[in-house]
């Protein structure tokens, strides 16, 4: 019998670390095979520190970013990380790149997918990636796309946390306790040497989401003592047998 | 060891049948003790057929509505149904009535609560009941309210389906398969003799929500063949250990 | 055969003039009997000019406001104007006042109702009046409220234009050409001697809404040459036989 | 004198049947010439049953879908049905295809247009079609586009009902009684042999929208006894002479 | 010449510390006289730790909460702190209490006001306090309320940060650098001995809002190096002479 | 030392006049160098009057529109006006055009930017221009875009007023007093000979926005007597040292 699977669609090569590194490590620990697609390296827009180095080139930045992302993926027990190298700021995915993503979705057959918020005025690559993910999910469900392949079911698409949540109309409906894998997330975060200014920021986020976990699981009357958590917004309704 | 519990806060005495009768019967079948509070009988505003009878009185309408509701509750295996008799069109709950509801919440200690949508331009009693439920949930969490009593944790408040969903800004995020208890819900519906014009309507709703269940659980690629379902909107984020 | 009817619920005694004076005069010209309920005189909050007069009293302000409103109503061919004198800033309507409004609604049996926007951070009396109107509309539909009276059908509730539309989440879906009765609206406006600073403002509004009428009726390719118009937002869906 | 006209812009070749078949047949019965543009056949994404047949090809699916759509159009008394064959899942309309649509709009000069909801996370082709319709409507109004042609006025764009309304932020403001043409809509629905699982679903929708029609036209106090109805959301404000 | 002034309306006696302690201390340092109104002590709902003490009474809790709040106010250089003692969970302000608040507003004549978010499903006292503040601001502007008193202008109402921002539809449009007074805010926070579990939480909030300050003031290309900040949402538009 | 700067991104060559002519002239008077980019001339969609002239050509329309825009820019003391000539109805900006805009943004290094509303169902070019502006702002911030150039900070993007504000989900949060430069704005407006039907419309807008300025700056209790104003919506939060 095969493992359960999950798929992350990350606009830039570091996004999956800050925003859902805990979810990745936690599900890996539960036996999921987690695949990560980095649509770009974030080489132009999210690598300021590298560009400040003397004589830096685009290929040099990409290589450094890839190395960091691979190290982080390893720290999180990601099963495979794929780099589509589509360019960033702005990110663009043409028909061919989208078909590649459909191929990945169909091969992985994820239980759930993870991507960015639907809006982000600071970073138009993020909602662009989400729209690509939604379109490719739909294509992967089409019986007439590469007939004969295994058709995708209806995996949830979870939107992970953007940097300035309130500016991005992002509202979490699911809070995940990542306490047991926090050390792995922190290790992955520390692989992002070019963005050291964000390490403390995302530790604060994890601590405060854990406060939300405690409150929403019962607060001072039975709430669970989570130390670190991540929040997610669901696109589709859940189908359940018990409320 | 005691059973799990759930609590429905229904503005009028028939609302719990149309809107969450399936959820009630299903959780009862799973061993939950389900309590229903009817804030009013709906005696003025939702009893047109009774009022068309010669010589009908307010007490006569209330008695008839109570009888119907008790029969429906029995059909759904409700453990207790309480009638607050606060009046309807408009519904008003003063401090004393609200404290009574807090008492019920604390006694029941529900795993989850169910009430109306946050908006309803047709029926202002509905969102009023929901605001009462939210306030009483908060009071039940207060350590200084009747100190010494068992404090409430943080049960989810699910909003059940209003009559014209799109006019009420109601968006379901949870779809519950009620196929196995449909016969009970239909039997409860048929207890509502005064509102026979709604029987077919809510069967249609259940059938179409089941279509949504099938689609969101996988559609033609593995979706579950639910025949009847109910939809719910959550107020609070879920706290989970797995996505 | 009786005339068609319409009912305006105005928080303060001048609101009906600025916000729907054109609609009133136009429908009166079409043979409607238009009733106006002024819940208050706006004596405290919308009568600054009167209060600046030496020795002014509350009763003096009310009398002056009533006189202005009656003159405006006459200019608009209002059939009856009722003053509930409930006080303003803040407006409050208790059960008795609400029942009085229900009585008016049932007596008038309006084809449509008019009231304020659903939100207004500047003036909490305005959305309060709208909530009262919605609740009383619902009560007037209840067969158990004063059984034996004629039950209300389902009149549209149109929300007329607030002062700063965008701050009030007001979005017009209906634009009414009031060109033929503009002189009457202007005359009614000029009855409001205490608020002369608003005369030009609402003429500008009427002219610009007429521009919207022209654009939405065809623009430079067949649009109607309205000179003055008013905008309204509907609460309920229309039921039609033709799109 | 020429007939009134209407134009439907349908992303896939079956959408116009489920979502506005009643509106089409009703307006045809009133003497409108109704044109339907199917941007694609829905050959890849909405033809699962056909693809399950042994040896099916893309051209085979398209031919079958076209035949079904033509039969349905005939059943609904559509005057002309045009197939743009732009491909689906995903649908894309380039400049040339858009100019073709502008040509159709200008030739038809519709009283009103019909298309999809503004959002649909399940089906990105649907809102894409609506954006195309809005853009082409705008281009058809441009005096500098093919100067000398008859310029488009300002037809309403009605959004017809998506499959899971609440997930698509669709809110109907107009409910159309289609009782007298229901038999035609049902016949058209039955032309969709590949999607038999939807027949009952859309009959339920029509029955329940009729309940909304009854309620919003007066309910138990004078509401019209519609048996089948369709709901629509308007994009633009209406321009009227009477409320 | 008198000092500039500001007014905080706090539902419970600790809210002003967590949510706008920095704004208070900063404006005090700039020479503002800052007044704080605590509508309640939060004695029932926000004093769990006190209630866990053996033999605690309502008066005992209130006294302890008042002492903490006074100490915090002193740490923040508040000019006056007023306790309305209206009760909490639920908070209710009758006409008399509201008139008292109007009196305070008129006496203080604030440049700006601060209160809670417009929504909060966890804590209905918070939006209730904001609605009271908005209504009282309006009454304070009424020339007919206590004629002869100095009328209020149009101070901005800033909404300070609720505990779970995204669940409260709170979107900050203004970020205030509080670095220079952080020590005072931290000292005030530490006065809240009964809510020690929140100290780290709100330090995290302040650090992360400072990150937003840096980004929105220029980021890595000239942003200001704020270390601590607070966010606020404005209710009313600003009136300016320069963008 | 160099002047402060501002940048307007205008979809069509007249938009900057109606929508932010006052802001331009006012900031020019304060010493700002204001640059205007017209992405198109509005030659197809906003030049009806010109197209009605016998024998008019596309080039003729463009030349006339350019002349008008240059005259208006001069009247407003614009420092430079750039015509990208990308075509309109629909407007499209490819990678090369976007890079040109990034170049302008980096060269100008604006204190703030101005563009259209985020939505406009009448005119899809307007929100398209805003999305282009947001994307190019982001690219201009990327250290890896043309490394070595001066990186953009984080200028505010103000959205100026669309024609039918409520239909465009536009909500102004900033009102600018343009009284002192009104004569310049009126002169610029009168350069738009082809759109004379809009002159009075936008004077009405300016007068009514001034009413809002007066109210929001204190109303009858100290509000400033602005005669003409413009409204703007901000995309990003402000970073401030004082509320």
Image (spheres, coloured by chain):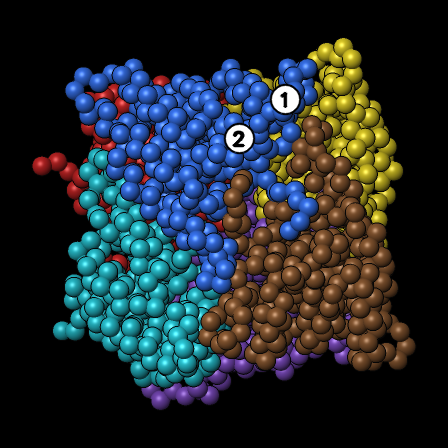
Chain colours: A brown, B blue, C red, D cyan, E yellow, F purple
Identify whether C49 is placed above or below B182.
Answer: above
Q: Residue furthest right?
A: A54
Residue toward you, A42 or F203: A42
- Give the residue pinned by disc 2: B32
Q: Is residue A206 left or right of residue B81?
A: right
Residue toward you, D241 or C225: D241
Residue toward you, F25 or A22: A22
- State the image quarter where residue C23 is shown: top left
Chain where mark 2 sits: B
The disc placed on residue C74 is none
Residue at figure coordinates x 34%, y 75% from the top left: D65
- Mark 1, mark 2: which one is toward the viewer? 2
Identify whether D121 is placed above or below B104.
Answer: below
Q: Is residue D6 left or right of residue E25?
A: left
Residue C42 rendering spot, x and y as whole percentages: 43, 29
Q: CA distance from mark 1 to mark 2?
A: 33 Å
The disc placed on residue E88 is 1
Q: Is residue B61 left or right of residue F49?
A: left
Identify whether B103 is placed above or below D134.
Answer: above
Residue at figure coordinates x 58%, y 76% from the top left: A99
């Amino acid at each position: 019998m095969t493992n359960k699977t999950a798929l992350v669609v990350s606009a830039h090569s570091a996004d999956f670390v800050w925003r859902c590194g805990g979810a990745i490590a936690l599900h890996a620990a539960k036996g999921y095979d987690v695949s990560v697609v980095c649509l770009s390296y974030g080489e132009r827009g999210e690598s300021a520190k590298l560009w400040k180095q003397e004589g830096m080139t685009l290929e040099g930045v990409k290589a450094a970013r890839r190395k960091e992302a691979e190290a982080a993926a390893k720290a999180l027990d990601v099963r495979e990380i794929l780099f589509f190298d589509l360019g960033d700021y702005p990110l663009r995915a043409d028909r061919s790149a989208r078909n590649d993503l459909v191929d990945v979705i169909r091969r992985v057959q994820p239980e759930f997918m993870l991507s960015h918020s639907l809006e982000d005025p600071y970073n138009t690559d993020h909602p662009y990636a989400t729209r690509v993910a939604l379109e490719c999910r739909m294509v992967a469900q089409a019986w007439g796309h590469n007939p004969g392949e295994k058709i995708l079911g209806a995996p949830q698409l979870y939107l992970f946390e953007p940097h300035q949540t309130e500016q991005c109309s992002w509202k979490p409906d699911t809070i995940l306790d990542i306490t047991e894998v926090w050390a792995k997330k922190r290790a992955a975060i520390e692989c992002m040497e070019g963005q050291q200014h964000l390490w403390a920021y995302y530790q604060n986020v994890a601590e405060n989401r854990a406060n939300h976990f405690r409150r929403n699981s019962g607060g001072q009357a039975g709430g669970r003592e989570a130390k670190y958590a991540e929040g997610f917004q669901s696109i589709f309704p859940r189908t359940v047998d018990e409320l």
